[in-house]
Amino acid sequence: MFDNVNLWMNGRDISKSKTFEVLPYLSDVTEWQNEHGYNCTGKLKNYNVFVSDSGIALRGSLAKNHFGDNIHTLTRKDAQWAIEELSDRLHININAAKVTRLDVSTILYTKQPPADYFHYLGEKPYFKRLQVHDDTLQYNNHQRQIVFYDKKKEATEKGVPIPEILKNANLLRYELRYTKRINRQLNNDVTAGKLYVRPFYDSLIENWYKELKEIQKLKKQSFMLDEATTVKGAKDALFARLLKEKPEIISEFMNAIKAEKKFANRADYSRLNAELNKMIATAEFHEKEDLMQEIEAQAFNIAKYAR
């Protein structure tokens, strides 16, 4: 359930403070000197590594580093293996490294294209809703970010191969990104080694699900066109929709025709009133709750059975 995991290892915590001993294990090393001292950058598979006297910073995707892509979901056990792999490659135990950014994420397999779901995801308390592109929806505040996007489209644009089994699937990526003050937000001293230990791992997944639940779910009405195969059926569909949106107009209309004594038979007034209200009661409107129920049910199962 992890994607980007940025880490910081203080030089004081590294054996004998020999931070630069990791350089032989990096590729594409660049060195420079400034008023703060000697610094280096390099690559460790997917990770960008910054090295100085004060410590070592790693920025990148733990999933990509382990799998080669972040389409596959990094489970708790995978996260442990990935962190052990980083330690082996750096020849430093990074379990005590502080987590400075953490993305909790996975893919939801949807019936419709991911962008179809964005219209029904409304506001969220203490977040600013921002639709960046047709295929990306964000919720931002000062400490964390929630992002929904079309993972298959993003991977295709970046030239990342889609596994054969997923080529015909709709892949909705949902990410909860902790970007600042992680320890304060999670009420814990968050280190690399703690990410894969229960119950802390379970609490992260619960938070991931809780953030989705707190987003307002919108209902959008659409015409029920099953009977609109004739002119009369189409007129009735439109009329029913208008009555549904403004039901008080029935009373206004009934009062008007009664005042004009339009019907000779008084029972006709009751019959008309009943027919108009029946149109409201029986008119079928598609409220797109099914789309929201689909992703919430899937997220619930992921949170419940996350391993």
Image (cartoon, helix red, strand yellow):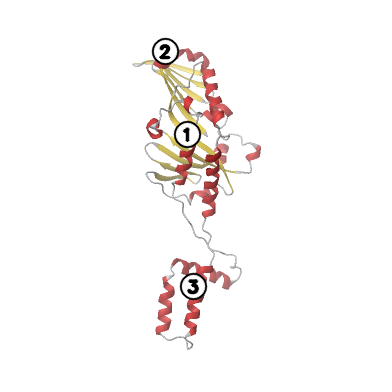
The residues bearing labels 1 and 2 have C-alpha atoms spaced at a distance of 29 Å
Mark on residue 277? 3
The residues bearing labels 3 and 2 have C-alpha atoms spaced at a distance of 79 Å
Decide if residue 105 is on the left or right side of residue 12. right
Identified by mark 1, the residue type is: Asp
Residue 303, image x and y in percent? 52, 40
Identified by mark 2, the residue type is: Ser
Identified by mark 3, the residue type is: Asn
Of the residues under marks 1 and 2, which one precedes in the sequence? 2
- Label 1 secondary element: strand
- Label 2 secondary element: helix
> Contact, CB < 8 Å: mark 1 with mark 3?
no
Q: Is residue 216 above or below residue 25?
A: below
The residue drawn where x is 65% and y is 39% is: 165
Residue 182, image x and y in percent? 40, 31
Q: Furthest-front residue in view?
A: 199
